[in-house]
Image (spheres, grey):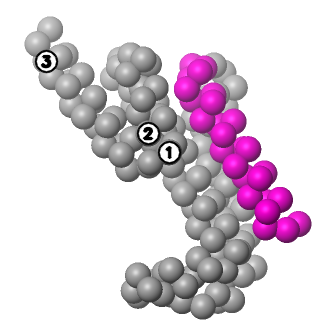
Amino acid sequence: MNAETIFSIVNTIALVGWILLVFVPRWNWTRKIVLSGGIPILLSIAYLILIVAFFGQADGGFDSLENVMKLFTNKWAALAGWIHFLAFDLFVGSWEIKDSQEKGISHWFMIPCLIFTFLLGPIGLLLYFVIRFFAAKQGDKE
């Protein structure tokens, strides 16, 4: 299988996970395949396979920004890096949903968090922590 095909497959799998989190977070299948960690685990397996197959074949390293940039000139290293983002961001989105449900935070507040986590990872997580902080303060007043 070529890198472009794998890229398309993992993107589709991750997008399905995000759609389920945004639109049907309490659905039984969302719990089974996303909130359980299923899709992030699947993406992590794809990542592991790429790392085992291609590690050391790219120029660069992790010791400087310039060397990290060199790593991503190799399509297999770039694909592995992309899958890394997909897996971790979806895992964070899943955690946000589970945590918000435990804390009774309205799903309407979660939708922007999920969108930002999907598109801009840490910004979505930061937004969730801000909402979570104010939701906790609101709960203290009641």
Numbered circle sitting on residue 6 = none
Task: State the residue at coordinates (54%, 89%).
Answer: 60
Q: Is residue 20 magenta?
A: yes
Q: Is residue 70 left or right of residue 133?
A: right
Label 2 belongs to which residue? 116
Residue 3 location (% of width, % of height)? 79, 67
User: From mark 3 to mark 2, how far is it between C-alphas?
Assistant: 27 Å
Q: Which residues are magenta?
A: 1-26
> In the image as oriented, which residue stretches furthest toward the top?
142
Along the polypeptide, which appears first: circle 1 or circle 3? 1
Determine whether the residue tagged by mark 3 lies in a helix, strand or loop. helix
Residue 22 location (% of width, % of height)? 55, 26
Task: State the residue at coordinates (15%, 22%).
Answer: 137
Label 3 belongs to which residue? 140
Q: Quadrant of the C terminus?
A: top left
Residue 78 in view of the camera:
yes
